[in-house]
Image (tube, rainbow, N blue to C red):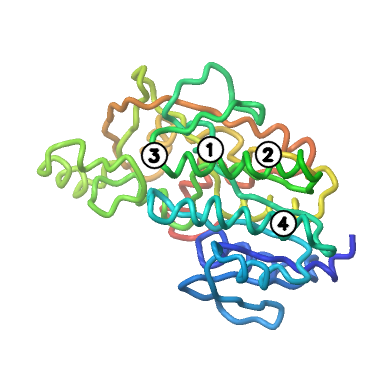
Amino acid sequence: MDVLKNKILVTGATGKVGQAFIDGFLGDPNQKGTLRALCHKRTVNPHKRLEVIHGSISDKATVQKAMKDITHVIHLATTKEDPETIMDVAIKGLFWLLESCKESSSFKRFILIGGDASVGHYFYPHKNPINEQQAHTAYPGCYALSKVLEETMLQQYIVQYNLDGTCLRAPWIMRGDDLKRHLSFGTQVFGVPEWYKMIKARTALQYQKQHSIPLMLDANGYPMQRNMVHLNDLVAAIIIAIDHIEAKQQTFNISMDEPFDYGKAAEYLLKTRQIKSVKMETKYHSTWLDTSKAKFLLGWRPAYGLERMIDAAWGNIEL
């Protein structure tokens, strides 16, 4: 395909993944196309190959304007547990985008960045590794439901209109010192669980002063295995999927080779940094996202495993 003619719309462009994708795409000498960012309340840094359109993704006219002459869509726009806005973004916004795609003469491919929330994250037990054939199993809350509805809507447009769509299903996305902030008993913990709320305040403060980390245990009492992906690896997968022939109408799990093992992480941090751990019981279940399909069809490989993820976070650098 002629990458010079690619004109890519990025929704959710001001978010963690959106900004990283824009930087990665513009910094990749093999990517010669242009970008258009659909921004709502915030904006992105100017660049000669980047155009910005402001407005709401739930507004039909705004989406139609943003879609003019577009060849690809990287759909990242989402909201978390916000019942007031989530259907406008996840359903109405996606609907207008897909409607514009099927009517467009320039359109080539729609890339949805999904999430493992659509297959239950760590809320449900799975006897086998989770592959792309796993049935949708949203956990309680509107966010997980929205991820199921997004994947379902894209799949139906593939069925109804033979749309060229790709879903990259990503788990928890890490960058910088996110992992270090997650493995903290402080009140500024990144993500969930919020460890300091699970124990007495005095005990949490003591662990924090000692720089101890939580060793998360699953519902069976074993060290938790939880899916993660480094931001750089996800961006690499998105760039590969833009024009890869094998990405057409496919869903791919994009994750680390192995899930993040809290037991192995505790051992590595003790060995390399003399950081001690505290076992923390939870009701959650260990899971394993199978990434074989992305490796086989796309040739994608994650560069970040457990040790490199830890080294990047504790060194506060991107290795």
Around disc 4, counting alpha carbons within 10 Å, would you say few (fewer than 14), some (14 to 19), or many (20 or more)? some
Q: Secondary structure at mark 2?
A: strand
Q: Amino acid at mark 3?
A: Gly
Name the residue carrying label 1.
116
Residue 141 - label: 3
Q: Amino acid at mark 2?
A: Phe
Residue at x 19% of width, y 49% of height: 209
Considering only order in the chain, which callout, 4 or 3, is on the residue closer to the N terminus? 3
Q: Secondary structure at mark 3?
A: loop
What is the residue that sits farthest to the left in this orientation? 202
Considering only order in the chain, which callout, 3 or 2, is on the residue closer to the N terminus? 3
Residue at x 59% of width, y 26% of height: 135
Q: Can you see residue 23? A: no
Query: Gap in Å between the C-alphas at discs 4 and 2?
Result: 14 Å
Measured as percent of width and height from the top left, residue 312 is found at 49, 53
Asked whether disc 1 touches disc 2, contact meaning CB atoms under 8 Å apart, the reply is no
Asked whether disc 1 touches disc 4, contact meaning CB atoms under 8 Å apart, the reply is no
Considering only order in the chain, which callout, 3 or 1, is on the residue closer to the N terminus? 1
The answer to whether 178 appears left or right of 6 in the picture is left
Name the residue carrying label 4.
239
Residue 252 - label: 2
Of the pair 153 and 252, the residue shown nearer to us: 153
Of the pair 191 and 51, the residue shown nearer to us: 51
Specify the quadrant of the image occupied by residue 192: top left
Considering only order in the chain, which callout, 2 or 1, is on the residue closer to the N terminus? 1
Q: Is residue 88 above or below residue 192?
A: below
Measured as percent of width and height from the top left, residue 61 is found at 62, 70
Query: Gap in Å between the C-alphas at discs 1 and 4?
Result: 20 Å
Considering only order in the chain, which callout, 4 or 1, is on the residue closer to the N terminus? 1
